Amino acid sequence: MNALLRGRVSLTVKYRAVIFDLDGVLCHTDKYHYLAWKQIADRLGIYFDEQINNRLRGVSRMESLNIILEKYTGPLLSNEDKERLASEKNETYRKLLMQMSPKDLGPNVLSTLERLRKGGLKLAIGSSSKNAPLILERLGLKHYFDAVSDGNNIQYSKPHPQVFLMAAEYLGLKPQDCLVVEDAKAGIRAAAAAGMDSAAMGDAAGYELATYSLKDIAELPELVGA
């Protein structure tokens, strides 16, 4: 077993479902977010770089805008102005997403999903993004998932647990039956708040609230006994 066990959970636990965050776990759209937000920031005269862009991972569009506006020194923006800017960013981002294809999948993603399904696991998406359906379509992944919970059906973004609780509800399962796979600390906190175990990857690997840490998504089937 290569996965690092954290906390009280036994490796003999058999989960009934795996709920995946989308961006950063199954694919990477950071470059598209960055380009779309930078277009807005440049026009407003706000300094914006990839380090600031990393702070936007796992949070909602409006929360992301508010982070960018921390460095804004121009005229006061109304709520309507902010809504317009957020919508403009999303339109640019969606146009950029049309460049995506299955080649943008992370390494070992397809083989991992196939092995999990063959092992009898239900699979779901738990993403704060309202563009999750479009991304799944562009990646050719729609048919792998039994449920999709995303920014279109939730009121609260991570670290609130709503997106994961909704995914479990759509699957017809209890939270404790589900394992969340996340690469953001906000997502790990959301899983903990939902009463779900979590497997942390990337930037979240080693986070103290995570149940497991994964070096590679390919370790997941062994972890869940698939």
Image (cartoon, rainbow, N blue to C red):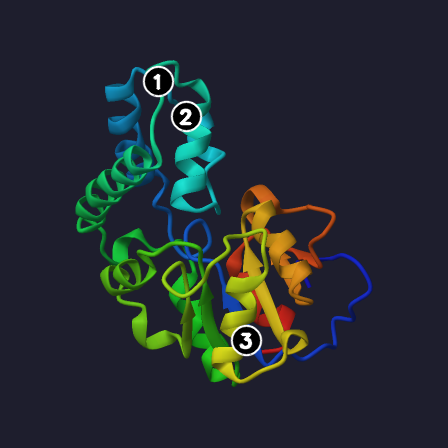
Is residue 214 among the parts visible in the rendering? no
Q: Closer to us: mark 3 or mark 1?
A: 1
Coordinates of residue 174 in the picture (x, y in percent): 63, 80
For label 1, the SS is: loop
Q: Callout 1: few (<14), some (14-19), or many (20+) C-alpha neighbours within 10 Å?
A: some
Disc 1 residue type (three-letter): Ile
Between discs 2 and 3, the one toward the N terminus: 2
Q: Quadrant of residue 69?
A: top left
Number of the label disc, if any, that sits on residue 46: 1
| Disc 2: which residue | 69
Coordinates of residue 66 in the picture (x, y in percent): 44, 32
Q: CA distance from mark 2 to mark 3?
A: 35 Å
Asked whether 80 or 203 is in front, the reply is 80
Asked whether 216 or 142 is in front, the reply is 142
Q: Is residue 43 above or below residue 188?
A: above
Q: Callout 2: few (<14), some (14-19), or many (20+) C-alpha neighbours within 10 Å?
A: some
Q: CA distance from mark 3 to mark 1?
A: 40 Å
Disc 2 residue type (three-letter): Leu
Q: Is residue 155 above or below residue 48?
A: below
For label 3, the SS is: helix
Q: Name the residue located 46 percent from the left edge and 30 percent from the top edge.
A: 67
Between discs 3 and 1, the one toward the N terminus: 1
Q: Callout 3: few (<14), some (14-19), or many (20+) C-alpha neighbours within 10 Å?
A: many
Disc 3 residue type (three-letter): Ala
Q: Name the residue located 31 percent from the left edge and 71 percent from the top edge.
A: 142
Q: Quadrant of residue 64?
A: top left
Coordinates of residue 33 in the picture (x, y in percent): 32, 39
For label 2, the SS is: helix
User: Answer yes or no: do the residues labelled 2 and 3 have beta carbons within 8 Å?
Assistant: no
User: Answer yes or no: do the residues labelled 2 and 1 have beta carbons within 8 Å?
Assistant: yes
| Disc 3: which residue | 168
